[in-house]
Image (cartoon, rainbow, N blue to C red):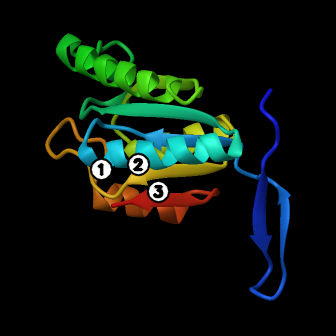
Amino acid sequence: MAETKLQIICKGLDYCKEVDSTIRHILVPFDASEYSNRAFVYALDLAKKYGAELTIISIMYSSLPTHIQHQTIIDDDTEKKMEKSFRRLRDAAKKFGIQIKTEMIMESEIVDNILSYVSAHKVNLIVMGTRGRGGPNRLMFGSIAMATSQKALCPVMLVK
C-alpha cells in the first residue's frame, strides 16, 4: 500500500494546514482526444504526488436504447483502437511506477455513467478534458464536462 501523502486544506485563507491527502482515487473519463490525453497527464502527475489509485474509463457512446445495449457488442475496430490507447496509457504510467485500471463502458448516458462510476468506486477526484471527439463516437464535449462538474459530489478538474 502506498504511503499517505500530505495535502494542504484551507478553511479560508487565514486557516490552512496539512492533512493526510483526501485524493485517493482519481478518475479520468477518456476518449483518446487530445483533451483527454492532457487530462490523463495531469491525473498521472497527481496520482504520483498523492499515491492515489488511477482509473481510466471510456464510455463508448451509443444511441441504442438501454434495453438493447447489453446485447450489443462494441464495434471491433473501435474496441481495438481504445485498447491500443489504453496500452499506451498503461505504458506511460508504468514508467513512473503507477498502475492504472482501464474500463470500457457502452452506454448512451455519458454524464450519468461517469457519476455512477464515481459513486460506486469511491472516486475522490475527476480529471477530464473540456472537450472531446465529435460525432457519434464522442465521449464528452463542453456540455458534458460542464454537467459533470456541476453534478459530481467530488471535485472535478477540467483540463483545456
Q: Earlier in the sequence, mark 1 or mark 3?
A: 1
Q: Identify which amino acid the numbered label 1 is placed on.
A: Tyr
- Name the front one of labels 3 and 2: 2
Q: Identify which amino acid the numbered label 3 is placed on.
A: Thr
Residue 54 at what x, y percent from top left? Answer: 58, 35
Disc number placed over residue 39 in the picture, else none: 2
Note whether 17 is above or below 13 in the view shown: above
Q: Identify which amino acid the numbered label 2 is placed on.
A: Ala
Task: Name the element at disc 1.
Answer: helix
Residue beneath disc 3: 148
Note whether 27 is above or below 6 in the view shown: above
Residue at x 27% of width, y 32% of height: 62
Spatial separation of the CA atoms under disc 3 and disc 2: 15 Å
Asked where in the image residue 41 lies, by quadrant, the reply is: top left
Spatial separation of the CA atoms under disc 2 and disc 1: 6 Å
On the rendered image, what quadrant is the C terminus found in? bottom left
Residue beneath disc 1: 35
Residue 40 at what x, y percent from top left? Answer: 43, 42
Q: Residue furthest left?
A: 135
Disc number placed over residue 140 in the picture, else none: none
